[in-house]
Amino acid sequence: MQADHTRSRRWFLGLGAMWSAAIVACRSKTPPSAGPRVLGSPVSPYGSRSSFEKATRYFDQNTKVPLEEAASFTPLHDTYGIITPSSLHFERHHAGVPEIDSTIHTLTIHGLVDRPLEFTVDELKRLPSRSRIHFLECSGNGRGEWNGGSTESQVQRIHGLTSCSEWTGVPLSMLLRECAVQPRATWVLAEGADACKLTRSIPMKKALDDAMIVYAQNGEPLRPEQGYPLRLLVPGWEGNANVKWLRRLKVLDQAAMTREETSKYTDLMPDGTARQFTFDMEPKSLITRPSGGDTLPGPGIHEVSGIAWSGRGTIARVEITVDGGATWTPAELQMPVLPIAHTRFRWSWKWDGREARLASRCTDDTGYTQPPLAELIKIRGANSNYHNNAIQVWKVAADGKLTNGNRA
Amino acid sequence: MQADHTRSRRWFLGLGAMWSAAIVACRSKTPPSAGPRVLGSPVSPYGSRSSFEKATRYFDQNTKVPLEEAASFTPLHDTYGIITPSSLHFERHHAGVPEIDSTIHTLTIHGLVDRPLEFTVDELKRLPSRSRIHFLECSGNGRGEWNGGSTESQVQRIHGLTSCSEWTGVPLSMLLRECAVQPRATWVLAEGADACKLTRSIPMKKALDDAMIVYAQNGEPLRPEQGYPLRLLVPGWEGNANVKWLRRLKVLDQAAMTREETSKYTDLMPDGTARQFTFDMEPKSLITRPSGGDTLPGPGIHEVSGIAWSGRGTIARVEITVDGGATWTPAELQMPVLPIAHTRFRWSWKWDGREARLASRCTDDTGYTQPPLAELIKIRGANSNYHNNAIQVWKVAADGKLTNGNRA
């Protein structure tokens, strides 16, 4: 890690000259504020954010869909680093957020096992634990762009169904082993304790690989919207498969073909067939600052920042274009770059004040590079609601205004 | 990182046999809860934790010290992973938490510079940024143990003045360079905007090395208790030097000798002299679970977990003793192990049901190993209030009760 520090220092030294004029221009003309002369607030049991901060999750309040069966979007343009504040983690509920007492809730593992087991939350917390920093993304994230670009302009509204947290829990493999899974078992059905009993089938291979039963998020117990007190975590797989309020795992010899893997969460192809069980969230990146809705104050130097992630591994490279993809320049990746986690990237852009088409694309350590939207549509058609990982273009107008540039 | 994942998997496979009986014993006798049959809560703009969760920062409500000039302690026994929830980050205020409007607040850099500059928060946010996961620890953390062990039993009350966050901001070196610091400048005086205008002198070498002006914490703007809207971050240095509500940096040719570096935050030695400007937080580790106040349910296998950190670099090794330091066994470190950050360690302990003296000690990548309390006192005496990084011993009684084992 020392080497990364050194590299980062060199990077900033190199930037110095470029940014010099911009920094010196910061000199403001008003006298500095002296600050308060009275005592502030006392220490407190559990803190909250400043009343001056207003960033919120976005959701459509004027829809006919009940808000218990809705999604809310992380303000990606207003977040920093790689950890998403738990209060701003995106939501997607199918029957609202149940209020569960963790002292009563249990997880049962049954089905094709010789020894069914049932765990209380406290029992799970006493077992060997692990922590992982992983993103979660709804596979419907960016669904409005499939038809060649939507009229939405803000990164939050277009792509805010991705967030990244430090999760803590137990490896599912350890629990399954003690249940003595029978040889013909190939799938696990995960069921939530919400009113709709949301269910998803997970291949046994994934369950035994890196799946976890998590009870903590960003250092404290899971938030209710994220499955309190227990959630299945299948790293790198579409959000819906990470079943919240987990109450039951039934071991099966085939997929259960639940609503969430037949009528929903399948990708309709041009020939009328559907891709099913498309769990992997493929490499994707977004420039979040500046992004749609922002206005550059004028020509000159600007920081371009965003996030990249891959459900299949680690981000190896992020590149930036300002000419809609004709030429690309590498961005700087913020250490630590972790597998299956948001990776923050940054790049200094000297804008000449002319129209531009600004975008990022990422490549992961499997060698896969994020495709342009037109290429993705060429293969997958425009019928899908899911798995849009195409490059997001921001159109920069001569007056500095950024808008969604996906519609050519 | 793939290698780390693989290693971790092997570790859990190896643990399997050891934990088998404990997991199978988890089988509970009650029928599983069916969960609610009514819709839960709708999506919401900004989430909060479950009403069933009660962990809070601790502070003494019966003291004569006003709660505006007090400390509150992170519930380390109730946190997970390496990120401390911002709402539970420890506090130490000298004049309470000021309520500052970030659109009015500015940072001025002046003194021995050719070009004094003043920055608004928005101007700083537009400059090249960086994010770092770093711990902050009050140098008074564990002060009650200097006299050979206190009567406090809980890890939160003894050592809860340490927390770890992802911080985002700008490198101070970049700002200082543009101010054209004069050749004889050797120190920078940092001043907060709280009512007492807390001030600390920082050597120019540190200011130009890795110091940052941070505006974000764990993905959102700094919390008010952590300096909203701007804080000086001097990675690895005692908490007090990381001046909150930062409003002014004055470049000097000597230390300012403020109250916080003369009558406070100096370490009184046995001969009556004081160590001054002892900025580094030396390697330290704590077993947080189980810890004082916990009771082991009985002999058998138990997870032992805790945190280790070093202000000088990266944790290289954590070892565990159950016999008060006669023998040591290596613990598993949770990846990623980051410089100047909390590092989570874990170890599986097969307790035989007899009295034990449980403790951890860490070694950082400079080769320094955390000392026993008696050794630290031999060198430093027992007069200091600051910089206790000694090994914390938990005494385990035959009935499973854990208490503070520092008093021999």
Image (cartoon, coloured by chain):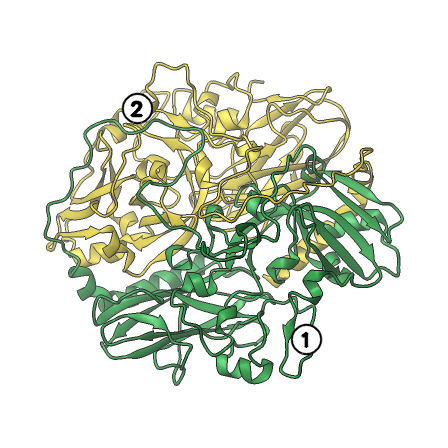
Chain colours: A green, B yellow
Say which amino acid is labelled 1. Ala
For disc 2, the neighbor class at 10 Å (few under 14, some 14 to 19, many from 20) is few
The answer to whether tags 1 and 2 share a subunit is no
Q: Residue B132: x, y in percent?
A: 41, 52
Query: Is residue A335 positioned above or below B232 on the image?
Result: below
Instruction: Using the image as rendered, state which of residue B237 and residue B300 is in the foreground.
Output: B300
Query: Visible in this render: residue A345?
Result: no
Say which amino acid is labelled 2. Thr
Residue identifier under label 2: B273
Q: Residue B214: x, y in percent?
A: 32, 49
For disc 1, the neighbor class at 10 Å (few under 14, some 14 to 19, many from 20) is some
Q: Residue B110: x, y in percent?
A: 14, 47
Subunit bearing disc 2: B
Q: How many marks?
A: 2
Residue identifier under label 1: A274
Horizontal side, residue A12 vs residue A135: left or right: left
